[in-house]
Image (cartoon, rainbow, N blue to C red):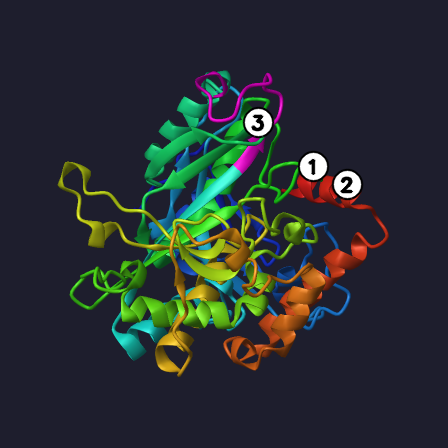
């Protein structure tokens, strides 16, 4: 949508960096139309800023170069003023070269190029949705999933849903979750780029409203060593050129089509490297362990919340069509990841499965015994292991401009170095404060 800015509205042009944080520049409302046409200045080295603040010491860009943040008018989000803060008009932007040509290290451009490549090679389109979990502090103690917790969060919860509706993010559910003070937000499925844009915006809208309501909030993967983690579940489905579902085949194991099985095979084949991009904080892998309902192993299963890839349930209630609902859920992601990159690498891995000769994976039925699933390949035990796997996976490396991959590795290793020597509790506290 195209919105206009009145004289009291701040215009903020934003990108999401490799730490999963939204950064950008604001311009006066009088410059709104000009910034839509020509963007605002940006610097390549900004991509190398770590979540804790400093630029990674081996930043490949140095002090050289200039970019433009060019807003995408379709991403416009108008945040209304209230008694606590003025209104704001927020745009997500592509990072481009000064002449407007694409910059090869822009994460949003990386996703767009991925979708083009998938379409050109297979004719397929991706529909996606992101589920976010987060913790609100300052609420009374309450039982998991309880009506009391739901009501204790009022009027924040109702205000949040209304805000998401107002901004066009299409909220689907707002629910009290299992952990202390934990909630989950789901948005309706959308075309892949729009889904990832919404995932970027969602966190900022939650944080902004929570700040205005005096409620500390965190999307950190863990908030306590023995606590329940906050995940981001990425749901994926494929559509053919005529818009028909491409993952569903009721004659096959798990009702997963041959296309879906090959797509899944690519993700499973490159799991260790992928997790270095989808769960990239120093504490992410403390959550990704068996019996935490996150991801206990690199396997594909029906309706199993320990699976890396879960075949989600469908319903025929009310005449609903199972084929239209059918999707895969990737469970080894969290809110420290860049949504554009996380979704892009899953799609690129799936494309590798569709175009290469990977073995079709086993679809483990819902009733499979836990002892059998324990034999599945384990996820990396730490971010160090995941980054090493990413660096060694030549297929995954080939998807990236070398400067983008080098910067990701540099940022993540600098974050590890900044927490070196701390115990898990302190590492969790530091990450919690950032996210």
- Confirm whether the magenta stretch covers residue 138: yes
Q: Earlier in the sequence, mark 1 or mark 2?
A: 1
Question: Which label was assigned to residue 224?
Answer: 1
Is residue 273 placed above or below 189 in the rendered structure? below
Q: Quadrant of residue 89?
A: top left
Mark 1 Cα within 10 Å, few/some/many (few <14, many 20+)? Answer: some
Residue displayed at 53% across by 33% down: 208
In the rendering, at what x and y percent does residue 277 appear?
57, 62
Give the secondary structure at mark 3.
loop
- 114 to the left or right of 2: right
Image position of 295 with respect to 426: above or below: below
Q: Quadrant of the C terminus?
A: top right
Viewed as shown, does residue 166 lie left or right of 251?
A: right
Nearer to us in this view, 274 or 407 = 274
Q: CA distance from mark 2 to mark 3?
A: 19 Å
Image coordinates for residue 367, horizontal then vertical, percent? 40, 50
| Crowding at mark 2 (Cα within 10 Å: few <14, some 14-19, many 20+) | some
Q: Are marks 1 and 2 in contact (CB under 8 Å)?
A: yes
Q: Which residue is mark 2?
A: 425
Residue 76 shows in the view: yes
For the point 51% across and 39% down, which residue is it? 133
Q: Name the residue furthest left.
A: 319
Give me the disc on residue 334.
none
Query: Where does residue 322 sit, x and y in percent of width and height?
Result: 21, 50
Q: Secondary structure at mark 2?
A: helix
Q: Earlier in the sequence, mark 1 or mark 3?
A: 3
Q: Position of residue 301 (x, y in %)?
A: 41, 57
Residue interval drawn in magenta? 134-149
Q: Main secondary structure of the magenta part?
A: loop
State yes or no: residue 381 in magenta: no
Disc assigned to residue 181: 3
């Amino acid at each position: 949508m195209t919105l206009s800015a009145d004289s009291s509205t701040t215009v903020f042009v934003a990108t999401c960096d490799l730490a999963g944080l939204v950064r950008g520049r604001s311009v006066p409302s009088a410059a709104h139309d000009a910034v839509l046409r020509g963007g605002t200045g940006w610097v390549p080295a900004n991509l190398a800023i770590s979540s804790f603040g400093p630029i990674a010491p081996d930043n490949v860009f140095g002090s050289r170069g200039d970019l433009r943040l060019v807003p995408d008018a379709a991403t416009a989000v108008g945040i209304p003023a209230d008694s606590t803060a003025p209104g704001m008009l927020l745009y997500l932007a592509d990072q481009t070269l000064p002449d407007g040509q694409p910059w090869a290290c822009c994460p949003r451009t990386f996703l767009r190029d991925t979708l083009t490549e998938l379409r050109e090679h297979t004719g397929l389109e991706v529909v996606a949705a992101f589920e976010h979990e987060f913790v609100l502090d300052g609420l009374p103690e309450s039982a998991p999933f309880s009506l009391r917790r739901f009501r204790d969060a009022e009027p924040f919860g109702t205000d949040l849903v209304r805000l998401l509706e107002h901004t066009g993010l299409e909220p689907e559910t707002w629910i009290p979750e299992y952990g202390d003070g934990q909630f989950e937000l789901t948005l309706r499925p959308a075309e892949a780029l729009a889904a990832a844009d919404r995932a970027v915006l969602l966190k900022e809208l939650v944080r902004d409203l929570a700040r205005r309501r005096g409620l500390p909030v965190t999307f950190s993967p863990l908030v306590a060593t023995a606590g329940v983690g906050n995940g981001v579940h990425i749901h994926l489905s494929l559509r053919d050129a005529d818009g028909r579902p491409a993952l569903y085949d009721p004659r096959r194991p798990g009702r997963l089509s041959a296309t879906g099985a090959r797509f899944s095979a690519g993700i499973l084949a490159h799991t260790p490297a992928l997790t270095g991009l989808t769960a990239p904080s120093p504490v992410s892998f403390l959550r990704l362990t068996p019996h935490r309902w996150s991801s206990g192993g690199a396997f594909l299963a029906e309706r199993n919340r320990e699976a890396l890839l879960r075949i989600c349930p469908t319903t025929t209630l009310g005449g609903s069509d199972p084929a239209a609902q059918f999707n895969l859920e990737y469970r080894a992601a969290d809110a420290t990841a860049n949504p554009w990159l996380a979704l892009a690498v899953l799609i690129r891995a799936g494309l590798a499965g569709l175009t290469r000769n990977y073995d079709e994976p086993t679809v483990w039925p819902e009733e499979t015994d836990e002892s059998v699933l324990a034999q599945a390949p384990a996820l990396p035990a730490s971010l160090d292991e995941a980054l090493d796997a990413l660096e060694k996976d030549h297929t995954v490396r080939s998807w990236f401009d070398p400067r983008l991959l080098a910067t990701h590795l540099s940022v993540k290793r600098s974050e590890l170095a900044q927490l070196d020597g701390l115990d898990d509790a302190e590492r969790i506290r530091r990450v919690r404060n950032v996210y």
